[in-house]
Image (cartoon, rainbow, N blue to C red):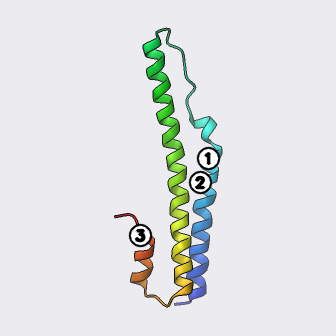
Amino acid sequence: MDFKVVLADLTSMASGLHTRAADYRALHPQLTPAVAAGGDPGLDHAISEAAHLISALHTLFADRLDDHGDKVAYARDSFHRHDIDVHGLFEDLMKGEG
């Protein structure tokens, strides 16, 4: 196995995940629903809370993409620093998922 290829692939994957997170964040205004007035204060509050929840979910998804990019970068750095086997690399990728 050529370690340069593995390191380049991991670098590309980490960069790709961070790029997709930034792209998704840029879409946030288009994905967040406008808060409509329903004419009733209780209904307006419920609509507002639902809109905030949807907005928070979009933010969490982008954060999750960034987190995975960080984990892949960590695995790449660990792979580069240490003479580890494939099993060790997967442990680095899955750290904190369990």
Q: Which amino acid lies under the numbered mark 1 shown in the image of this protein?
A: Arg
Task: For marks 2 and 3, give the CA distance.
Answer: 20 Å
Give residue 83's position: percent from left, percent from top: 49, 91
The image quarter containing residue 92 is: bottom left
Q: Which residue is mark 2?
A: 21
Comes first in the chain, label 2 or label 3: 2
Q: Is residue 90 left or right of residue 35?
A: left
Give residue 18's position: percent from left, percent from top: 61, 60
Q: Which amino acid lies under the numbered mark 3 shown in the image of this protein?
A: Lys
Task: For marks 1 and 3, give the CA distance.
Answer: 25 Å
Report the label total.
3
The image quarter containing residue 35 is: top right
- Name the residue rendered at 43%, 87% in the picture: 85
Whether residues under marks 1 and 3 lie with C-beta atoms below 8 angstroms apart, the answer is no
Q: How crowded is the residue under tag 1: few (<14 C-alpha within 10 Å), some, or many (20+)?
A: some
Which quarter of the rendered picture does the C terminus lie within? bottom left
Q: Which residue is mark 3?
A: 95
Q: Which residue is mark 1?
A: 25
Q: Which amino acid lies under the numbered mark 2 shown in the image of this protein?
A: Ala
Q: Is residue 28 left or right of residue 68?
A: right
- Name the residue rendered at 50%, 62% in the picture: 68
Q: Residue furthest left?
A: 98
Viewer-nearest residue: 39 or 13: 39
Whether residues under marks 2 and 1 lie with C-beta atoms below 8 angstroms apart, the answer is yes
Viewer-nearest residue: 96 or 55: 96
Give residue 1's position: percent from left, percent from top: 51, 90
Whether residues under marks 2 and 3 lie with C-beta atoms below 8 angstroms apart, the answer is no
